[in-house]
Amino acid sequence: MTYILEQEVKDIASPFLIICDGYSDVRLIDKLLQHHHISNCRVGCKSDKFAPNLRSYLAAIKGVADLQSRLIKGMLVVMDADKSPKSAFVTACEALEFAEFPVPSRPFVIEELNPRVAVYIVPGIKRKGTLEHLLLEAAYKKNPRAEKCTDEFFRCIGNARSTANAKAKMRMSALVASTCTGNPWASAAMIWSDKRNPVPINSSCFKHLVSFIKKFSG
Amino acid sequence: MIDEIFIEHFRGFSSTHITGLKRVNVIVGKNASGKTALLESIFLSAGAAGPQVTLQLRALRQLGNILQIVGEPSAYRSLWEDLFHWFDQDKTVSIKIVGSNADSRSMRVLYEDSPSQLLPFGLDASSSSRPLSTTLMPQVLFEWQRGDDPPIQVRPKIGPRGFEFEGASAEHFPVIMFSPHATDAPDENAKRFSGLSKTGKISSIVRILRAEYPFIRSLSIEYSGTVPTVHASLTHNYGKKIPVALISDGINRLLSIMLGIGTFPKGAILIDQIEDGFYYARMPSIWKALYRLAQLNEAQIFATTHSLECLSALQEAMRGNENDFSLIYAQKENGVCKITTTKGKFFEATIKQGFDPR
């Protein structure tokens, strides 16, 4: 496990920090860090109990780093684009600014400030959506038939007025429910603990994210 | 207002530089991490009354307030040894405080190269009772300096009448220290109360105290025996005034601190274990009251605490004024005290994460 104690920040154990929008993003990045043997990063996210928003989570990191004299060399914020990648970027920048970290001028750019800082918007450059879009892409690439099946399933019983994000979540849930037999109700965060997980961690769909993290922490 | 503190070879500190100080500075950390020593460093560098302040600190540390003076070098050195990091008196204690207007005060304690005191004293050289031998005594030197002014040097010497402090007393930077082990004498509080009353500055303190403890109707100076003492008229006491110290230790302590803030405007108010004597539920409003009074008097508070309740109360009190607060974390690593600070605005988020700096 490389994420920051799931929810609480009690120590800053690595110089490069990746701060996510939610726990599902944390688990994916945690898996990617392990798979690619990136050991100088820690990943964490806000939580309702300890830090209800990104702002307070980054403030806590800043406070703990100050008090423990920990040097933060890099701060990468990973946000879900949802409907607007632009507003996701603004939210990330406002939180960074509040916690007195430098602010990057645009997303997907690693700025050599003090510390190094970047904002990555999931699912990727010029795309709207959430983590599920990225996970589905990887799952469908491995098993193209699954895409047709989940689409068909959604056409049969889904709500046509659902948003794109809701549709992606529904497709993901349907896929997980039908493959993760040990834990059919697994969320996107929990699929990694099931052997039949439909999302391959070595998928080329994560290539851009992985190379970004490698560059960020290099 | 103090912005920065540099400490070298003092008590548990080998070398430390403290920045980011604010109007209210709350010092946390485990036992023996250097919290009280940090307060003492400010107290000493203020140069309030010359080297005798080090003896006051001994009393505050409960090392006793009576000194037995013996004309031996080791006994003389033992009087000052606790000031030096790891008791190493070959080094120089150095403390420097830098204010927001670039005003600075520094203080050094060191031994002079050649011993200059000769004991025994008071014997006539021509007398037949001339001693068989004399003892060369080491000489400690206290030096205070304001900015680039010439330093003021004071040498504590053992003389026929006990301790004598040779040299001028340094100019007083307003500072007051409250220890949980020593309360101010009643007449001190009365003196401060009277001073503030004469200048029309007591009303805000009385108002705050009454808001906190509504059963207090008014305060006045009365004689308790032969000692002038601050008395309170209580709502349920049939008009009879009683000494504040008799009502409650906590109320008396709060009054002492507030009188200290009022009497030392633009000064440093040093409070060791601020929660001592206060009912926990009162802490948020006590913090608010002290902050308000410190703002009013442009004073700066340095307070230590071990209490999580006290820290939680602080979060409530500083809401909206986070930039006026700083959290100072004292730690001991390999026997050396280390100080880190963070801003008030990060403090709440840090504590909520379960980070326990006590």
Image (tube, rainbow, N blue to C red):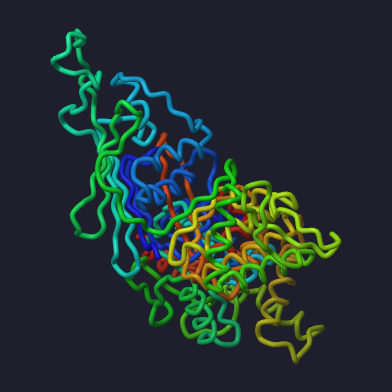
Indicate left or right for B72 with A184 as reference. Answer: left
Q: Position of residue B200 (x, y in %)?
A: 56, 74
Residue at the outermost left position: B126
Q: Is residue B89 above or below residue A45?
A: above
x 32%, y 48%: residue: B95
- A43 to A120, vertically: above or below: above
Tell me where residue A123 appears, x and y as whole percent. Answer: 54, 77
Q: Pick whichever, B88 or A203, lies toward us.
A: B88
Task: Give the quarter of the image for residue A216.
Answer: bottom left
Q: Nearer the viewer, residue A129 or A207?
A: A129
Looking at the image, residue B155 lies above or below residue B1: above
Q: Quadrant of the N terminus of chain B?
A: bottom left
Looking at this view, is B93 or A18 the one in front? Answer: B93
Residue at (17%, 13%) from the top-left corner? B127
Query: Residue sitting at 50 percent across and 83 percent down?
Result: A90
Q: Nearer the viewer, residue A183 or B179?
A: B179
> Which residue is situated farthest in the bottom direction here?
A161
| Residue shown at 61% from the left, 50% from the top | B186
Answer yes or no: is residue A139 visible: no
Residue B351, by quadrant, is bottom right
The answer, for residue A215, to whether it is visible in the render is yes
Where residue B340 appears, as percent x and y from the top left, is 43, 53
Q: Percent position (x, y) of residue B234? A: 79, 62
Count of marks placed on residues: 0
- Horizontal side of B253 relative to B57 (left or right) equals right
